Image (cartoon, helix red, strand yellow):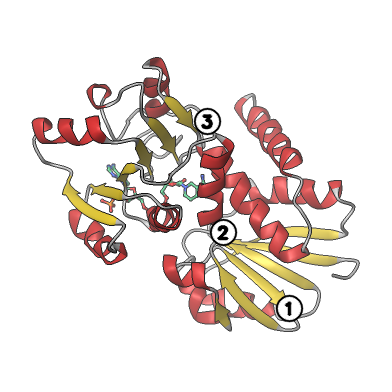
Amino acid sequence: MNSGDIAVLIGNPVTHSLSPIFQQAAFDHMNINVRYEAWQTHANELKQKIDLLRSSKYIGANITIPYKLDAMSFVDNIDDIGQQVGAINTIVSRDGNLTGTNTDVEGIQNSFKMANVDLKNKSVILFGAGGAARAVIVAMKNAGVKAITVINRTEDKAKHFESFSSSNFKVSILSAHLSIKFHSALFTDADIIINATSLGMYKGGNELISPVSREFLNNSQVIFDLVYTPEETPLLKMAESLGAQCIGGLAMLIFQGAASFRLWTDKNPPVEVMFHAVKKELSHRLHN
Ligand code: NAP
């Protein structure tokens, strides 16, 4: 790295992203002279913007919605995790060469580690089959989960998740419309329930909705909601009131960004500083 280097966020929209806040806080805290820029990018500019990263002043990029898949076509290599997920959220630029990877997987695994939850041999129910859910299923498989049931509003979109199945990782796809009785037994046996849909997200149009109703939750489950605005989603509120262990999406956001930071700089990210910067920003946004 050189003095005056740049890291960027490529997506659309990028205006309200928290990445510039906590990445810049991390660079500043470590006295690394890197500026983190948010690049609002239209689809027809994606290749050109990624190509710019080949210049020596760029250390890399975060890729966000809606380009995590499309960006794969414009890098030189994709590492194993990026290949497994089939989407990239980070590009590392070295000597004009661009490598794509997916740090959401590490972000998810570290969220469970921080909460002292061992994933080995656990049974998981996953709501959602979009880009984030793909990172979840790879994270679960690589951490030794024994079985996962994927439930998605559009069942067809969940179908391709069956390809993650292996002899010691059983993947089942379940219709979101099955009878309550059937669901009930499944949930009683589940150790971990994960929401990777946008239900519960602030200003998402469904902010008051949980993907699962109260009768399916109990205090022996761990509930992980990827949604981080609000920090306490309807699902987490319900689970907490029942005494279940809850993990919010903010941890994943920070840990995936921290993993990108480490790849760009080869230095240990100041995770506490990143958490603090995001919490401060969210509190500021809430009161303004
Ligand atoms: P995506 O690819 O657009 O997928 C959205 C998912 O939500 C799909 O499974 C979709 O189901 C489901 N969904 C949307 N509206 C629904 C509704 N009204 N009822 C039932 N299901 C509905 O988005 P994504 O990138 O996977 O992101 C999903 C969520 O994870 C977002 O809230 C995002 O903020 C969050 N996320 C968090 C982090 C983090 O760092 N914490 C990182 C990435 C994403 P269909 O297939 O039926 O449309």
> Which of the two discs, 3 and 1, sits closer to the camera?
1
**Residue closest to the eye, 267 or 237:** 267
Rendering coords of residue 49 (x, y %): 63, 75
Answer few, some or many: residues within 10 Å of disc 1's Cα (few below 14, many 20 plus, some between 14 and 19): some
**Residue closest to the eye, 181 or 64:** 181
Horizontal relation, residue 58 to residue 191: left or right: right
Mark pair 3, 1: CA separation: 36 Å
For image coordinates 43% across by 44% down, the residue present is: 119
User: Given the image, on which type of amino acid does mark 2 rest?
Assistant: Thr
The mark nearer the N terminus, 3 or 1, is 1
Using the image, determine if residue 161 lies above or below residue 204.
Answer: below
Q: Quadrant of residue 219?
A: top left
Answer few, some or many: residues within 10 Å of disc 3's Cα (few below 14, many 20 plus, some between 14 and 19): some
For image coordinates 80% across by 59% down, the residue present is: 35
Horizontal relation, residue 180 to residue 93: left or right: left
Rendering coords of residue 131 (x, y %): 40, 58
Ligand 1 neighbours mark 1 (CB distance < 8 Å): no
Mark number, residue 94: 1
For image coordinates 50% across by 56% down, the residue present is: 105
Using the image, determine if residue 182 lies above or below residue 74.
Answer: above
- Viewport quadrant of the C terminus: top right
Q: Are marks 2 and 3 in contact (CB under 8 Å)?
A: no
**Residue closest to the eye, 15 or 56:** 56
**Residue linked to disc 3:** 231
User: Given the image, on which type of amino acid does mark 3 rest?
Assistant: Glu
**Residue linked to disc 2:** 103
- Viewport quadrant of the N terminus: bottom right
Q: Quadrant of residue 178?
A: top left
